[in-house]
Image (spheres, helix red, strand yellow):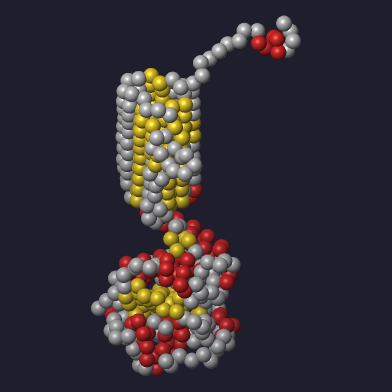
Amino acid sequence: MAHAVVILAAGLGTRMKSKLPKVLHPLLGKPLVGYCIDTAFASGAEKVVVVIGHGAEQVRQTFEGYPNLSFVVQEQQLGTAHALAQAQPVLAGFQGPVVVTQGDTPLTRVETLTGLVAAMQAEGAGMALLTMRLNDPTGYGRILRDEQGQILGNVEQKDATPEQRAIQEINPGVYCFDPSLWEKLKQVGNQNAAGEYYLPDLIRIYREAGQKVASVESKDTGELLGVNSRAQLAEVERVLLQRLRADWMNRGVRMIQPETIYIEPSVELAPDVTLWPGVILRGQTRLGEGVEVGAYAVLTDTVVEAGGKIKSHTVCDEAYVSSGADAGPFARLRPKAYLEEGAHVGNFVELKNARLGKRAKAGHLAYLGDAEVGEESNIGAGVITANYDGQRKHKTTIGKRVFVGSNSVLIAPVTLADGSFIAGGSGINQDVPEGALAIARERQRNIEGYMKRKRGEG
């Protein structure tokens, strides 16, 4: 039978010291609670309910459009059992197991959730919970067991005796319950040091009802790292990056100094991709087989087809680089920059909404905005397409095998026909016919003896 997942994400997150709700803080390009939601659905959940509090509307808007995802609000922070109870109206009538997890533990694995469901069902238990052993269990609830190893209960740090605080087996707050959960939640009290309604009290309540409590011990202590501060967010990011790097290297990606490389989970890499130190890959970036990305290049939502090359310190945003094309070093490809097969963009060249045809070249120190450059054309150093008149953008069209001399300004809208030649230093504001030479500059004039007269020497 399919299960549901309830994610508890109503905490204030005061230690983050931020106006942004804690569960929306970005972690490798995705909101923190987004990992928990994706893991829940990946586990096969039929329904996912997120219990939210601080910044509720902002959280709703962030995940608007997710199918089978619901939100409920915990208006008062009265404990984890009270938070879970807010999900009852959404899950009324649902007869499958209910998994409960935390919204600030983004490293929780799919196998952990499915394992809890399987353990509860295999042992005929009423509930199952995840446990783990920590050398320093400070801050966590401790698991209490009898002589036969059966779970008796859980004691919170605030309520524990010195002997109980010495227990290293802890309760990280991941559970699975049978459908009797909602009736049993009504029996949870708040007679404790914090005056809150604790979820672990359900261990006692299920046992008193004659139902078994199963457990699954996690051997991955990093899996349930929680995020309550900026430092913990950085630590979780470090662990997640280690996982991603290891996974990609196992799949044939070469990384030089992998600990310096930043990759978001949404990035796709093919075998034999090479990443040099300091590379940053973000968003929907996709690199084809054999692509090489040089040191300290930054690629966001960029596609580089097989055999393409991005040289060091190049920045690409929403760009497309075809097979055999290359960019950099120190190039900038802005949104809608497109390099066809074999095209070359060199150092300090910037493209925006511009397309370079096959084997076209812009070697250095150029700006091409709102432009189309035909195949095998050459753009000299210092060439600028003047595309903005102060109100509107205009297009520059450059045909095939056009030569644009250095330090020329192409004042759009303008068209340079196939095979035309633009003399260096020209300011072109009229169309140039096919095969024509265009010169638009003042004729050079040499004045003999000028400097001697200026210095009074002649």
Q: Is residue 12 visible?
A: yes
Residue at point 46%, 69% (across, down): 58
Residue 285, how many percent across, how many down? 38, 49
Residue at position x 35%, y 35% in the image: 372
Question: Relative to 243, does residue 390 appear above or below in the rendering?
Answer: above
Q: Nearer the viewer, residue 44 or 215?
A: 44
182 shown above or below 259:
below
Residue found at x 62% / y 7%: 448
Image position of 177 (left or right of 80): left
Give 279 or 350, whichever is nearer the viewer: 350
370 versus 363 height, above or below: below
For the C terminus, which image quadrant? Answer: top right
Q: Is residue 404 above or below residue 20?
A: above
Residue 196: horizontal and vertical position, in percent?
Answer: 52, 86
Q: Residue at x 49, y 45 (%)?
A: 278
Residue 409 in picture, x, y percent from top left: 47, 29
How many marks overall? Answer: 0
Q: Residue furthest left?
A: 1
Q: 347 and 215: which one is in front?
A: 347
Res 149 visible: no
Q: Name the image quarter holding residue 86.
A: bottom left
Which corner quadrant of the image does residue 4 belong to? Answer: bottom left
Outermost right residue: 456
From the top left corner, tell me how far across and down residue 76 is, in percent: 51, 83
